[in-house]
Image (spheres, rainbow, N blue to C red):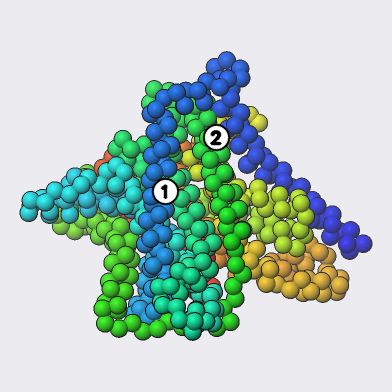
Amino acid sequence: MVKKANLDFWLIIKIVLFFLLAFFLVYPMFNLFKGSFFDVESGKFSLEYYKEYFSRSYYFKAFRNSMTVSSLATLLTVLVGAPLAYIMTRFRIRGKRFLAILIIISLLSPPFIGAYSWIMLLGRSGVITKLLSYIGINIPSIYGFKGILLVFVLKLFPYVYLYVAGALKSIDSSLEEAAESLGSTNIRKIMTVTFPLIMPTMLGGALLVFMTALADFGTPMILGEGYVTMPVLIYSEFVGEVGGSAGFASAISVLLVLFIIVVFYLQRYIVNKRTYEMSALRPVEARELKGSKKFFAYLYCYVIVGLATIPQIVVVYTSFLETNGPIFTGGYSINSYTTVIRRMGDSIQNSFIYSIVAVVIMIIVTLFISYLSVRRKSFSSNMLDTMVMLPYIIPGTVIGITYLITFNSRPLILSGTAAIIILSLVIRRTPTIIRSSTAILYQIDPSIEEASISLGYHPAKTFFKVTVVMMLPGIFSGAILAWIRSICELSSSIILYSGSTKTMAVAIYVEVIRTSFGTAAAISTILIGSTVIALMLFFKLTGREEISL
């Protein structure tokens, strides 16, 4: 009887989860796909949207731009992040923990804040631009391809750093010692032993960089000035000033999603063929550097981390300067903050409420999906896990469009409400919690649950009273990271928000577009401060000083 009750309980949960994912993920994606093949006015099947995309070089140029800047950013982040990870894990660097925390903070802060900060430094009226112009030096414009690439590299190299650092820590020292005993030089040892071992992990980090750069909306929108990428093109076509075309935007979105899925599974295929299981019974100990090697190692680490931290420093500093629109008039004050509280207090409140409600829903969904995928493995459980992870690789602008198309008419009208933003956050950020909760569930011995059931506890009661309690550390750590990403979300919110549901990220974007740099800096500082506090809470609860992605 216990077994039957157990089966019925989890069967009901599985059916409910499939229904929710079908309605809030599959159905919207189907509408997006369908909308790209049917003319909006006549309602008849048509390939005109795809013909229009491939017939005009302007549209295909956006794809080429996205590929160029994303690919080059991925290459440069590997060239920057991998050596940094090697130096930080293999050698004793003073202030290493502080540097690692700064790297994580720079990673979790919104990317469009980096774009805005570099405009204040290297823009046409930027501090550094003016300073150099006084001595007769003219520097290249921060706008366009070069500026977008700069922001992407400094923002995204932490992904490669974290992946590679984790892989290096898992290599047993005996492997490298064996290479040294056979006469390998340090460079040869790295290329023939260390590099092949970390290659799959490094490819995983590189893929994450590529996907993130490809899907980013805020940075190219703020810095682009004619350098149009796919997310910007999708947004522009959907909300165009002369009547946006939802059908054409849907066609572009479908092409982008299909491309991303192909790249994602190609990378997984390559990585799975070259995956190594490593267990560092005796990890490599960090050693002291001397002479010029020590100087250049310190210089490299502190310069790279310093450049990545500059946007946060600039934003906080300028938030206390007197401003008049885009002009800093001199002197210090908190006028920007008072203006933000008076004019944009609702946006701050909305961000906190939406992200908290979304995280609560994510936790509930995650608990059930993680348990089904780990404890009750089956084809349907694997399908459920795959479905919930799919939005992880779908750009936010695409999610925003699918939701606005789907929930702007019956059977469920949500456009313009807080609910549509919260649901988009849940769909996009649940994968952040799934992996951490699944990992900790693998560490819990199933016999503990079996003992509870054998003592007469109902399976459902055992799940909530025993299993969930033991999963809480993994759940909370993932939930904090999901909350940070939710409160910084721009790409989907910029499409879904209305006057009463504006969030902090949207407010920052609007202020930057209006060149109201003082208020943009003030609300950005509030957002960065919230991120740092949440991150410190994560370190406190987990007892760690690093995050896993």
Q: Amino acid at mark 2?
A: Val
Using the image as rendered, state which of residue 43 and residue 78 is in the foreground: 78
Judged from this view, the residue extending furthest toward the right is 1
Residue 99 lies left or right of residue 377; in this view the side is left
In the rendered image, residue 56, in percent from the top left (x then y), is placed at 41, 25
Using the image as rendered, state which of residue 451 and residue 183 is in the foreground: 183
Residue 454 lies left or right of residue 529; in this view the side is right
Q: Which residue is mark 2?
A: 254
* Numbered disc 1: secondary structure: helix
Quadrant housing the N terminus: bottom right
Q: Amino acid at mark 1?
A: Ser
Residue 49 lies left or right of residue 313; in this view the side is right
* Numbered disc 2: secondary structure: helix
Mark 1 to mark 2 CA distance (whole Å) = 20 Å
Residue 246 shows up from this direction: no
Using the image as rendered, state which of residue 437 and residue 307 is in the foreground: 307
Q: Any mark on residue 71, and which?
A: 1
Q: Nearer the viewer, mark 1 or mark 2?
A: 1
Residue 210 shows up from this direction: yes
Residue 254 lies left or right of residue 470; in this view the side is left
